RNA sequence: GCGCUUGUAGCUCAACUGGAUAGAGCACCAGCCUUCUAAGCUGGGGGUCGCAGGUUCGAGUCCUGCCAAGCGUACCA
């Protein structure tokens, strides 16, 4: 309907141009929006206000000209000028019933579109280091990313979801070393655990597995392991330097066996993460290994291109990328003085790889604490000769956790974090997803565990699900009470639906495709949540105001067709959110 | 210091990207269950849109300057 009106207006403008009321060079973007106040009709446009200035005309006069030039359309009942020069459209009520027919005809496809025209979008999200289980901070990215992916799929994009596995690099070495040290403890060695190692209980679990499988094959005495090391931080040393030397010691002593320990940690945690995400309703098309970029030479190749494009130089024994020439604050190291490439180097190769695979758009979903990283990645793409505009980084603010009045600090290494799995166990997958996506992603979010845990009626997800369950319940009652259902009869009598509650529902239902399109193109799933809450409100209000199972066959079937349409849209929306639509509650 | 993000009802947040009288949910107050699930509905109070300027027909939304919070500012990710 929106698009129809926009077409009518653009035809009117063309007419005015041929009448020389408007000049040919005016080509404004025609914007039709739904009105907030029913007194303003169903749709409104500010086109006359926009054009008034450049056309040097009185906006109300111009609005009159536009209205006069509008082609007639049977869906449009009345057109009015209001306020400073708004043009308000009143839609023929009979046209509004069409949405019920559409929903019944298209079913689960109602709301989907082909706006994306099959364009390829790669969306990378979560990508947490496999150094420990996912915690509640990752949950928000997981929920947000999967819903954005669903929305884009629903609007006709080809979506490829990817998790970048940091299975190489220093953090993983710290994990492997931590696993080994706990293994040594299990074997009976005693020593002070490094302050910068991973202290979570899950590490002990992996170590136990290692011990069960390999016995004491990897044991070295504590004396040997800790001989001649620098001081750890609690003793006045540097924890980073300390842990790095412990890692070197581990590699040295374990030699080829180091990889066994390393992979034990990596695979165990990665399997846990995969399972966790599946249970959370978040799936991927690909798990992309960072190590593979090293093994197949992608990193070297990317750096070689940067070098030949004259964007690399050497300083202080390290290789630097001239990102400051391309908008970054300063230059960045890609190869450290110890010969190791930085994570940034593999990120360059990874993002280049993504574009090489032919995606039209890349979406990265990062925690907001990584925002400073954006300019350097974009700079790298530019330096490689790629189009950095294809990369779209969406930031998700971390949800700060509260336990009642007390803020919970989260750090993977200190081991005191609430895992995503724990959260799911406590509040359930539906509520967790709903809460995560309920707010704009850039908005800081307070996640009160006490509140989320309490299975109280305050939980908005129940409100929406309850609307669906109520429709199901009515349909069950239909049988029990001996009423019949006749969809065709209902469709023939939709004009029976003339109460204000029904009109409101029709309008809300008709908005659904607009909401999906907007939520998808803006990457804002919270719009869908807000919509579903409004739809549920309209339905609950209607439910309380009118009986659906009435004797009158025409009215009953018209109403049943309406509430079945509501049920369908609730299912469609909840499905996109990855939330269940229970038939009974 | 500099950069990014955010400041809207007591609390948590919306506001169709510059439109008409800024809206919901909690919380609070007053009502509605022999009738399709009361996890629901109806009504009510509650606002200097952080502050000050500017841009224009029109600003919560855009520009500038302050104030406050979070994050970033590594040869860590």
Image (tube, rainbow, N blue to C red):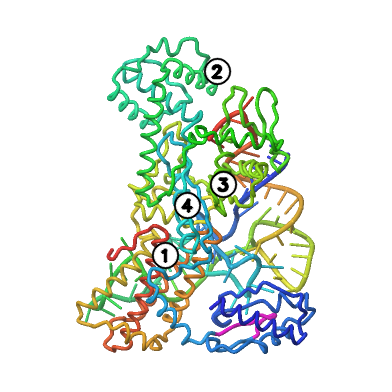
Disc 3 is placed on an element classified as helix
Q: Which residue is mark 2?
A: A237
Tell me which chain the residue with mark 4 is part of. A
| Same chain check for tags 4 and 1 | yes
Q: Which stretch appears magenta?
A: A81-90
Tell me which chain the residue with mark 1 is part of. A
Quarter-of-image position of residue A501: bottom left
Task: Give the mark toward the camera: 4 or 1.
Answer: 4
Residue closer to the observer: A358 or A458: A358
Q: Which residue is mark 4?
A: A160
* Residues at marks 1 and 3, CA–CA distance in whole angstroms: 34 Å
Q: Position of residue A304 (x, y in %)?
A: 63, 34
Q: Which residue is mark 3?
A: A356
* Residue beneath the point at 61% across and 52% down: A390
Task: Give the mark toward the camera: 4 or 3.
Answer: 3
* Residues at marks 2 and 4, CA–CA distance in whole angstroms: 46 Å
Q: Position of residue A316 (x, y in %)?
A: 69, 23
**Dot 4, crowdedness within 10 Å: few (<14), some or many (≥20)?**
some
Horizontal side of A101 relative to A344 (left or right) equals left
């Amino acid at each position: 309907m929106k698009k129809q009106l926009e077409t009518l207006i653009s035809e009117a403008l063309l007419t005015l141009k041929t009448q020389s009321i408007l000049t040919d060079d005016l080509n404004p973007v025609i914007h039709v929006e739904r009105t907030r106040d029913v007194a303003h009709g169903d749709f409104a446009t500010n086109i006359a206000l926009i054009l008034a200035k450049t056309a040097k005309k009185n906006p109300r006069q111009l609005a009159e000209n536009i209205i006069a030039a509008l082609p007639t359309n049977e869906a449009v009942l009345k057109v009015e000028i209001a306020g400073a020069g708004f043009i308000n459209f009143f839609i023929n009520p009979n046209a509004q019933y069409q949405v019920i027919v559409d929903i019944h005809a298209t079913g689960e496809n109602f709301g989907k579109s082909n706006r994306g025209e099959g364009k390829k979008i790669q969306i990378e999200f979560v990508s947490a280091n496999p150094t420990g289980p996912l915690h509640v901070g990752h949950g928000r990215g997981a929920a947000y990313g999967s819903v954005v992916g669903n929305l884009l799929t629903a609007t006709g994009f080809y979506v490829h979801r990817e998790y970048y596995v940091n299975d190489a690099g220093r953090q993983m070495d710290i994990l492997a070393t931590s696993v080994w040290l706990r293994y040594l403890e299990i074997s009976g060695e005693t020593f002070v655990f490094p302050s910068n190692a991973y202290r979570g209980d899950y590490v002990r679990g992996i170590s136990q597995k290692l011990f069960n499988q390999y016995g004491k094959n990897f044991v070295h005495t504590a004396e040997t392991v800790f001989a001649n090391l620098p001081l750890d931080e609690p003793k006045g040393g540097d924890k980073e330097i300390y842990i790095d030397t412990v890692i070197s010691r581990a590699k040295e002593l374990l030699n080829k066996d180091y990889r066994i320990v390393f992979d034990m940690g990596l695979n165990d945690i990665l399997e846990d993460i995969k399972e966790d995400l599946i249970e959370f309703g978040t799936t991927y098309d690909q798990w992309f290994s960072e190590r593979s970029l090293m093994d197949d030479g992608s990193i070297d190749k990317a750096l070689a291109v940067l070098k030949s494009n004259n964007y690399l130089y050497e300083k202080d024994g390290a290789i630097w990328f001239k990102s400051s020439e391309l908008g970054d604050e300063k230059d960045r190291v890609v190869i450290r003085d110890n010969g190791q490439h930085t994570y940034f180097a593999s990120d360059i190769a990874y993002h280049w790889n993504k574009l090489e695979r032919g995606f039209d758009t890349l979406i990265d979903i990062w925690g907001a604490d990584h925002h400073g990283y954006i300019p350097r990645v974009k700079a790298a793409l530019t330096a490689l000769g790629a189009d950095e505009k294809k990369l779209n980084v969406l930031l998700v603010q971390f949800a700060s956790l509260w336990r009642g009045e007390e803020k919970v600090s989260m750090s993977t290494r200190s081991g005191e974090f609430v895992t995503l799995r724990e959260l799911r166990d406590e509040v359930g997958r539906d509520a967790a997803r709903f809460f995560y996506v309920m707010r704009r992603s850039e908005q800081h979010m307070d996640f009160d565990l006490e509140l989320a845990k309490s299975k109280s009626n305050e939980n908005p997800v129940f409100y929406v699900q309850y609307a669906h369950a109520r429709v199901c319940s009515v349909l069950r009652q239909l049988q029990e009470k001996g009423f019949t259902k006749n969809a065709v009869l209902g469709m023939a009598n939709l004009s029976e639906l003339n109460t204000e509650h029904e009109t409101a529902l029709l309008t809300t239902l008709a908005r659904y495709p607009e909401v999906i399109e907007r939520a998808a193109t803006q990457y804002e799933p919270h719009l869908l949540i807000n919509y579903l809450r409004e739809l549920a409100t309209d339905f609950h209000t209607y439910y309380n105001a009118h009986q659906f199972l009435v004797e009158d066959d025409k009215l009953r079937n018209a109403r049943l067709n309406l509430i079945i349409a509501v049920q369908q849209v609730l299912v469609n929306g909840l499905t996109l959110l990855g939330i269940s639509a229970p038939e009974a509650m």
